Image (cartoon, rainbow, N blue to C red):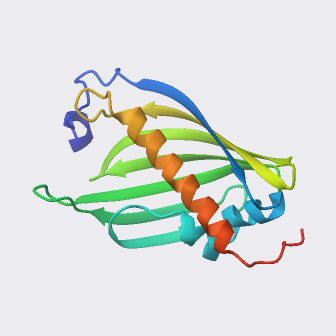
Amino acid sequence: MNDQDTAPGRPADGLDVRHDTFTISRRLDAPRPVVFAAFADTAVRRRWFRLPGSGAAYHHEFGVGGGETAQSTFTVPDAPPEHLDYRSRYLDIVPDRRIVFVYESTVDGVLRWTSLVTVLLADEAGSTQLTWTEQVAFLVRTGDGSADLPHLRGGTALRLNGLAAALQSSASPVPQH
């Protein structure tokens, strides 16, 4: 038996996996190629995609078969620090239109959830309509699990707010493909 078999929030039989799906849409004041570049360009990506905590390290390879790894240490008062790990892999990329990737989130060496994400980009009156759809499997719950989906959805919404802010501050020219 390893540590993951007895992790808090994980039933002894390991069969209690909770599946959820959510979609978040954002109208972004930038053309599709600029929004797409904010996912592809590592320097721009660092302005909006960050793990919470300190001591973060990132590695990003944008391309089918590539992905991203990130680690940080998250500390809250009156609790031990948590080591966060994020790993993703790009499955499908259609320049300026679609990004499909999978990712996993690990806390203190325990795989907590894994997701399939589809990001769609569409023209909308001089701006871009971004639609983020995430299908998640929660493998280990926090407490009774009732806060897990709201936490993930809220964190994703904040990340997309960061994307909008990064696009506003970006003076980058439209990339050529």
Q: Is residue 105 above or below residue 140?
A: below
Give the residue at x 53% y 39%. 115
Give the residue at x 59% y 39%. 116
Q: Is residue 153 above or below residue 51?
A: above
Give the residue at x 76% y 78%. 172
Image coordinates of residue 62 in percent, x first then y, are 68, 64
Would residue 24 be found to the left or right of residue 95 on screen? left
Image coordinates of residue 8 in percent, x first then y, are 19, 36
Q: Quadrant of residue 154?
A: top left
Nearest the camera: 92 or 46? 46
Image coordinates of residue 161 in percent, x first then y, are 56, 56
Nearest the camera: 76 or 8? 76
Image coordinates of residue 55 in percent, x first then y, are 34, 74
Q: How many marks?
A: 0
Question: Does any portion of residue 94 appear in the rendered image?
Answer: no
Give the residue at x 84% y 72%. 174
Would residue 73 be found to the left or right of residue 114 on screen? left
Q: Quadrant of residue 173?
A: bottom right
Q: Is residue 171 above or below residue 68?
A: below
Image quadrant where one finds the C terminus:
bottom right
